[in-house]
Amino acid sequence: MTNPYGTIITTIGAAKIAQAISEGETVVISAAAAGDGNGEYYKPTPDQTELRHEVWRGSIERATI
């Protein structure tokens, strides 16, 4: 079985990334959030503007590639 959890880049996020690339800038991601779908599985879509039943949001202290 494949892992049903992951991340997606939203349409708004993709536009911000494209703009940053075209302007030679970087995108600073300073926070992350998680939702639980209000107890029901659903597949997030790129046109979403918010999580379904957000249960956590916090600052990103450190990230590595």
Image (spheres, rainbow, N blue to C red):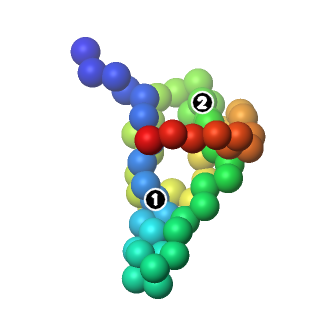
User: Label 1 amino acid?
Assistant: Thr
Q: Is residue 25 above or below residue 1?
A: below
Left or right of residue 32, residue 65 in this image: left
Q: Position of residue 29 (x, y in %)?
A: 61, 55
Residue at mark 2: 36
Q: Is residue 50 above or below residue 56?
A: below
Residue at mark 1: 10
Give residue 33's quadrant in the image: top right
Q: Kindly identify the residue that appears in the image at 74 percent across and 44 percent down.
A: 59
Q: Position of residue 57 (x, y in %)?
A: 72, 40
Specify the farthest residue to the left. Answer: 1
Pick the residue in front: 35 or 64: 64
Q: Secondary structure at mark 1?
A: loop
Quadrant assignment for the C terminus? top left
Tell me the crowding category of disc 2: few under 14, some 14 to 19, or many 20 or more residues within 10 angstroms, Cα based. Answer: some
Q: Kindly identify the residue that appears in the image at 52 percent across and 27 percent down.
A: 40
Q: Secondary structure at mark 2?
A: loop
The answer, for residue 16, to whether it is visible in the render is no
Q: CA distance from mark 2 to mark 1?
A: 18 Å
Q: Position of residue 19 (x, y in %)?
A: 46, 79
Left or right of residue 16, residue 2 in this image: left
Q: Is residue 37 above or below residue 59?
A: above
Earlier sequence position, callout 2 versus callout 1: 1
The answer, for residue 32, to whether it is visible in the render is yes
Quadrant assignment for the N terminus? top left
Q: Kindly identify the residue that appears in the image at 59 percent across and 24 percent down.
A: 39
User: Label 2 amino acid?
Assistant: Asp
Pick the residue in front: 58 or 23: 23
